[in-house]
Amino acid sequence: MNSHTTLIISTRGKGLYPFTRQVNEWLRKQPVEDGALIVFIQHTSCSLVIQENADPDVTLDLRDFFERLVPEEGEGYRHTSEGPDDMTSHIRSTLTHTSLTIPLIGGELALGTWQGLYVFEHRAAPHQRRVVLQIMGSSLM
Amino acid sequence: MNSHTTLIISTRGKGLYPFTRQVNEWLRKQPVEDGALIVFIQHTSCSLVIQENADPDVTLDLRDFFERLVPEEGEGYRHTSEGPDDMTSHIRSTLTHTSLTIPLIGGELALGTWQGLYVFEHRAAPHQRRVVLQIMGSSLM
Amino acid sequence: MNSHTTLIISTRGKGLYPFTRQVNEWLRKQPVEDGALIVFIQHTSCSLVIQENADPDVTLDLRDFFERLVPEEGEGYRHTSEGPDDMTSHIRSTLTHTSLTIPLIGGELALGTWQGLYVFEHRAAPHQRRVVLQIMGSSLM
């Protein structure tokens, strides 16, 4: 039996891509009751975010805010070999999250009503992003 | 036996609210020796921070810095249905933390001498905030 | 048997200090197969980052970006007792990470090819920084 898997999330340019549904589909097949799910993205130019799952405007405003906060031009970056969205992607991923840990209670993610999981893509080109899921049992049974 | 609980933290406007004491009170009644505590806030308009627990000026300076970094006015946000502090709260929570994982050693949080746990409230109105605590045993005994 | 240890990372001024090698040296002596490693830094004026391990320019650009994002001068900080890099360090640590959780698969960190672990020092003076490592078994075997 495996306690882990890797999801592949396809991105098509900068922005937030929801993947709560894929996580829940995998979780339903696992035996854990109480514990935690570790979510880990194996890249340094995209990241993880838990944000509102109701109004898509939130994800557009987030994308645009990071575009202003970490500008592509005029910053004098040294690391530019892959274009103007290269170093900005590393900075934006540092300002958000590479790993998240979410309690599992009664076999389900203990997310709030309005919380959803997103891959935050910081590169302009399409990518296939690897997200590792690892279940931890609480081992207090 | 339960390995988890939910704390309700009352907030009264923007700022940092300490809750290390409530966590320790609950932890003292639990049987775990070595492992980790997962701290997870079930909201997208407030967040978690580990910061200095000695000088209250640190929390005031933090609050004011985020007010300048993520301004309420002039940003052209789309998501404004709940007022000018709506989208800023989502951005500020994204820039800080929704989940934290803290080692438990000898039954105690392995915090540094000056570290304390805070709810960072980003909304202007009072709220009741839900923080889930989940204990994980190291299962290496 | 211990499931945890504390690494001491020496820093010599602002910037990113890699420590993936020290983590792997300790991990190799531990019995875990599948689970997770919790990495926790016991300070509020430095932090943890997972970033690119190939081009050192990335770490220099990151350091310089945070110098601009959180300026030492002209912000009207209250908390200045330890100098102009005191409050900026607390803010920069809040914007990055105090705890990280990384899946362990087959006894190894499930890092992506280009990912490395760094202590991000925000103080100008040299410091000895304490990083707690805690192994969690998945307990699903």
Image (cartoon, coloured by chain):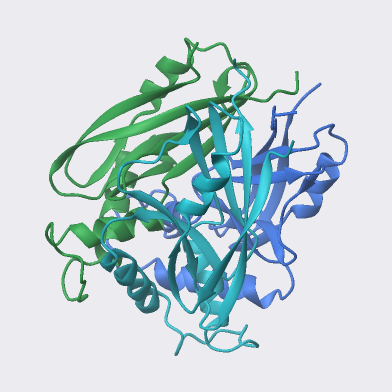
Chain colours: A green, B blue, C cyan
Q: Where in the figure is residue C81, as x and y percent of width and height? A: 65, 88
Q: Residue at x 77, y 24 (%)?
A: B2
Q: Is residue B61 left or right of residue B116?
A: left
As drawn, A44 above or below A66: above
Q: Where in the figure is residue A93, as x and y percent of width and height? A: 34, 53
Which quarter of the rendering shows the C terminus of chain B? top right
- Residue placed farthest to the right in the image? B29
Whether residue A114 is visible, yes or no, is no
- In the rendered picture of this protein, how many numbered marks are placed on residues? 0
- Residue toward you, A121 or B65: A121
As drawn, A139 above or below C57: above
Q: Where in the figure is residue A52, as x and y percent of width and height? A: 42, 40
Q: Quadrant of residue C137?
A: top right
- Residue toward you, A30 or C113: C113
Which quarter of the rendering shows the N terminus of chain B? top right
Q: Residue at x 55, y 29 (%)?
A: C35
Q: Is residue A12 left or right of residue B130?
A: left
Q: Residue at x 71, y 51 (%)?
A: B10
Q: Residue at x 27, y 61 (%)?
A: B76
Q: Where in the figure is residue A40, as x and y percent of width and height? A: 42, 37
Q: Quadrant of residue A117?
A: top left
Whether residue C117 is visible, yes or no, is yes
